[in-house]
Structures are given as structure tokens and as C-alpha cells.
Amino acid sequence: MKTRKILLTESEIPDKWYNIIADMPNKPLPPLHPGTKEPIGPDALAPLFPMELIKQEVTTDKWVDIPDEVRNIYSIWRPSPLYRAYGLEKELDTPAKIYYKYEGVSPTGSHKPNTAVAQAYYNKQEGVKRITTETGAGQWGSALSFACNHFNMECEVYMVRLSYDHKPYRKIMMNTWGAKVFPSPSEATEAGRKILQEYPDTTGSLGIAISEAVERAASNDDTKYALGSVLNHVKLHQTIIGQEALKQLEKADDMPDVVIAPFGGGSNFAGLAFPFIRLNLEEGRNIRCIASEPTSCPKLTRGVFRYDFGDTIGMTPLLPMYTLGHNFVPAPIHAGGLRYHGAGVIVSQLLRDQLIEAVAHDNLDVFEAGITFARSEGIIPAPEAAHGIATAINEANECKKHGVSKTILFNLCGHGYFDMKAYQDYFEGKIVKHEVSSNDIEASLAELDTPLIN
């Protein structure tokens, strides 16, 4: 019998997170104050984040201890399984070996609780009563709602309007765990009201939702803000994924040639890829790490590297990142978690240094890949996850074309069982190819007056 599922025991849950900054040849540039354009220190983040998370944001320590209480909660679903995708290999008739790390076994169905639990824990330790956040497809909002409920904290979620309308069951998940959910842009904040006045029919964006959540946190002393991607400490928490995958592949006596994950702001990709990039940096390995993004929001493949705001209104510090411009509103694709204008600072620097790769996939190709995977492996992937699958299929087809065998690993970051509207649209022929035009990108970037980077 073929070994399909590679498991670890609870005792093998990693007890530390990995901080790739310690190994990077070029450290990320500092964030800048939005007014003075001067580098900011940790104190500037204090209105939004608890001090322990701020320390993690700026640390250069290579390893950060995972608190026992966080690790105990992780044990509800961790270690997550690693699967050999025999069905997909057969369907593609490829000599490649394909593995996927399955994060859909978490209570919320995605990788997001890995950082949500940690962030809620540190906020609780510092006496915070309420956490505000944004969510695209609802995965992050669900995860933070779950975590806040565990620690008996209030949770307020600003959900991108497109997903609020298309994914009602994600909203109900959040409500079930006690969260208040607002369609963004909303009438609950000054930022939301301003956007609605100018664009009353907008489908929203993660940048707008971030503006609303940040505003709420900054104006209430008992409230902090939590971000589900982009920031350094978020990526740090997610590295538990890749650390487990590395142990599992060692048990299978294998090592990937290619590591793939979807890309919105960077936590998904960082979680799987960073522990393998460590091997490249430490041991001279040559593991290709590929970020998969949509052609409708291609900041890595078609954006520019410069300072920009993390939100639409301009309330966050200026971050050095690949961006399409903070006013950019992506097309209303179903992969709501990938509809973000910028990329995380660490991933942006790694791409600039050519230590990682990025590819973009068309909306229709992504759903065709998701259907292929569902029919060969049995799990219906979230639209975000299907981007990584599309890249894995392309890499496997290249192996077939050239008659070479490679080991491919990708992150199946979440299931799509609350995304049936997306699959319904696909079967009804409503999913169409979409690629943002160069004119639209240039027009968005032309609005930027943020500092350039040499």
C-alpha cells in the first residue's frame, strides 16, 4: 500500500517560530512615519499592537519561543497532515512527485489560526479587551473570531463588501464565535463613510477594510488591531507550517525541488517557504520557492518596489514593498484573500534579491486547476489555494515535457466548502479570464507621492 498521508505526533509540534530576517543577506528597509517620512521605532506601533508583538515585529533573533498555551491550542489541529498527491500525479501523467501540506484541518478551515491564536494570546496578556481587524474572503476574520472567543475577548471585523455578499457563511462563522461583522466600506467609521461618499457602489478592498479597522483601534484605548498577513510577526507565526513539512518530508526520505504557495500579503507563502529558504541560505541548497498571485492583482509580477501605505486612506506607516498603489481596487474575483495592493516587506526584499520567484495566474485557469485537484484528490480547494495548485500543475507539466522527475511541495492553505458560490459561477460559465491592464496599473501608481527607493 502506498503511503499517502505523512503524520507527526503532538510532541513534534515545533516549539519555536523561525525568523528569516536573521538569515537574510539584505535586511528589510525600515518603515517610515507617514508624515515626516523618517524611520519609525517600535513606540510608533504601540497604539495598534501589544508590546510583545511589536518586539517580534522588529526582532533579529533567529528563533522565537512559542508559548505553551499557544502550542496547546495549536494541538487542536496541529500537526497538520502532509499528503502525497498520487491522484493528481496520475491525472497529470507526470514523473514529478507532488506533496501538499493541508491546513484546511484547522477549526476555521485555513492556515490563519496559526497567527490568530498567537496574536489573541499576546493581546490578552496585556489586558486588551477588543481586537479589530479586516478580512478579505473571511478566512482571517473567522480565525481571529475563533481565537478571541477562546480568550474571552471582543472581536470586530471589517469584511470586504464583495466577500460579505458572496460568502455569507463565513460571516455566520464569525458571528457564531461572537464577532461583530461589518461590510466594508461601512458607515461605522470615518474612513468608510468617506469611501462610500466618493464610490457608493464600490466592491471594497483589503486596503479600505484595513483603514476602517485601524481607525477603530486607534480611537479606543481598550482596543488593538490585528493583521492577518503582510507584517513580520504574522509571517513569523506561520513558519510552523514549513517546519512541520520539513520534518514530514524527512520521514518520507524526500526533499522538495520546488515549494509553492498562494500570495496575497505574504503569510501563506512565508509560512511554508521560509523554513526551506533557510536551507538555501544556511546550507547552499537550491530549492525554488514560488509565490502564486492573480493576474488581476499582480503586485509581485507587475508592481513596483517603493514605499507605500498598507491601507487605502493612508493611516499605516509607509512600508518598503512591491505595490500596485494603495488606491488600487482589484477586480471582484472570488479569491478575496488575494485582493491586496501590496506585498509584505520581507517577501518584497527576498524577491528584490532574487531569492524567490513569483508567477501570476488567470482567474479561469485557477478554477480549472481547482476542479482538477478536487476530482483527483477529493478536497475542494479555496479559490486562494487553487492559485498554488495552478503553479504546481504547471511545474508538473514541465517535468513531463522535459522527462525529468522533481519533487513539488505546495500549501493547500484552506478548503473551499464555504466558497460554493465561486464554484457555482464556474460551472455556469460566469468565471472569465481577467488581467489588469497596464493603463490601470500605471494610473494607480501615478497617484503615489510616497518615497522612491533606489
Image (tube, rainbow, N blue to C red):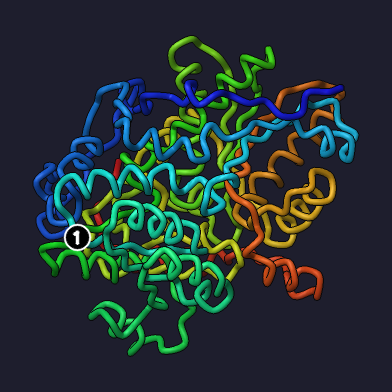
Which residue, given by chain and number where applicable, does mark 1 sit on? Answer: 129
Toward which corner of the image does residue 358 lie, by quadrant? top right
Q: Residue at x 45, y 31 (%)?
A: 240
At mark 1, the secondary structure is loop
Q: Position of residue 301 (x, y in %)?
A: 54, 48
Any part of residue 443 in sight: no
Q: Does residue 101 appear to the left or right of 4 in the view shown?
A: left
In-front residue for pair 374/89: 374
Which corner quadrant holds the N terminus? Answer: top right
Q: Residue at x 31, y 85 (%)?
A: 187
In-front residue for pair 59/391: 59
Toward which corner of the image does residue 382 lie, by quadrant? bottom right
Q: Does residue 12 appear to the left or right of 316 in the view shown?
A: right
Q: Residues within 10 Å of mark 1 (few under 14, many from 20)?
A: some
Any part of residue 57 in sight: yes
Q: Position of residue 376 (x, y in %)?
A: 84, 45
